[in-house]
Image (tube, rainbow, N blue to C red):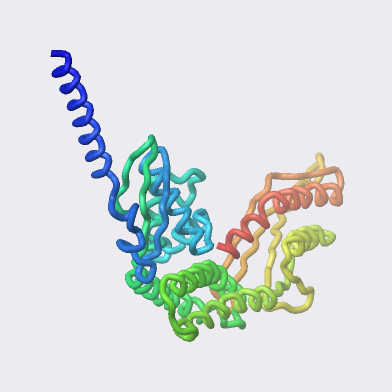
Amino acid sequence: MLTSYVYKKWFLHLLFLFVSFSIFAAKIPEWYEHKAVVYPEEFYITAIGEGNSKLEAELAALTNISMYFNIKTDVVNVLERTMMELDGKNYSFSKQTNIDESTRVNSSSEFFGVQFADSFFVDGKYTILAYIERDLAFDVYVQRIKDAAAKLEALLIIAEDYNNPISGLEAAEEAVPIANYVAELMKMARIVKKSTDTIFISTEALVQRSYIAKEICKESLVFQLIVENDYENMIYTTISDLLENEGYSLSSTNGTCTIPVLVSVEKEESVAGIFLYCNLLVKITDGTGNDFFSYSRSFPKKGGKTQRQAYNRAFQEIQAELNATFIEEFNARLKR
């Protein structure tokens, strides 16, 4: 009786081990033990990731893939935003400081052309394989490069018109992030598949032209500041200091672009003193005569016992407003 009991106990124990082993064995995908056979390096780029969840494992695998390309995952997210913006899509998390991890996985996966093999769970950890099919990824990169290069060509028509450096700089500022994006794509395309050095030669020229155009437009952007109805050069000095502190070039006699400033003053005299109502208007046009930048302010009444005192107070008010808001609005328009 005892022997029968022991026999049954051992049988159940062995059965449990067999079932457990079978279940465990079924959980381990073939790629784990035979990765070189299932995903040969000639045709695939692979990386393994581990984590406490499947999502963590995917992120780890993506990080390892990005190391293969020698590019950080946060850089990938910036480049992915560029791609989405190029496609005219609303990239909703572009202004968020914390990007949802699942969104990050999706965007980075799309950027690299990554797919995921079956994951498995053992010893409290998820393990997953990320892989890139070289030929497929190369074709995707080539098409993206062509699409972005077409946008660069269109922007360079404007950026390289050096007679209009305001609109040129605006186009060049837009072209440079695209050029950075294209440069990374070309680097990645060459990593996923060996190709001739000349395959992207025309696109590389576009990238370099974008950088050069931006520098030339910046150097050509010399402003001539003209202030009408100034008082003791107070407004001229304030605006010129603001612009020069930001690195813009000014000329008192000539410049590619004129900045006309008009101060309108209404004077009111009474027994109490002299009072001034001031308005300020800055209206810049580009080389083609189109309105480029407009800045206007109206100021409350300022006065004093003497005309000098009234003008000093009124123009100090204008200076304060210029110092507070002018350069921020100017930069926002010029660099948007």
Which residue occupies the foreground of this view, 89 or 3? 3
Horizontal and vertical percent position of residue 37:
32, 63
Describe residue 277's horizontal placement relative to residue 177 as left or right.
right
Q: Please state, as top left, top right, bottom left or bottom right, where the N terminus lies in the image.
A: top left
Which residue occupies the foreground of this view, 242 or 15? 15
Horizontal and vertical percent position of residue 276:
74, 49
Q: Examine the rendering and report whether any part of residue 229 can be seen.
A: no
Depicted 35 relative to depicted 270: above or below:
below
Horizontal and vertical percent position of residue 103:
39, 49
Describe residue 261's horizontal placement relative to residue 31 as left or right.
right
Q: Residue furthest top?
A: 1
Which image quadrant for residue 134?
bottom left
Which image quadrant for residue 335?
bottom right
Depicted 1 relative to depicted 28: above or below:
above
Question: At x 85% / y 43%, what residue is drawn?
Answer: 305
> In the rendered picture of this protein, how many numbered marks are placed on residues?
0
Q: Examine the rendering and report whether any part of residue 53 can be seen.
A: yes
Describe residue 75's horizontal placement relative to residue 140 as left or right.
right
Horizontal and vertical percent position of residue 126:
37, 42
Which residue occupies the foreground of this view, 204 or 272? 204
Which residue occupies the foreground of this view, 322 or 315? 322
Describe residue 261's horizontal placement relative to residue 77 as left or right.
right
Q: Please state, as top left, top right, bottom left or bottom right, where the C terminus lies in the image.
A: bottom right
Question: At x 86% / y 47%, what residue is drawn?
Answer: 306
Question: At x 22% / y 36%, what residue is drawn?
Answer: 18
Question: At x 50% / y 68%, what residue is drawn?
Answer: 184
Which image quadrant for residue 20?
top left
Depicted 46 relative to depicted 216: above or below:
above
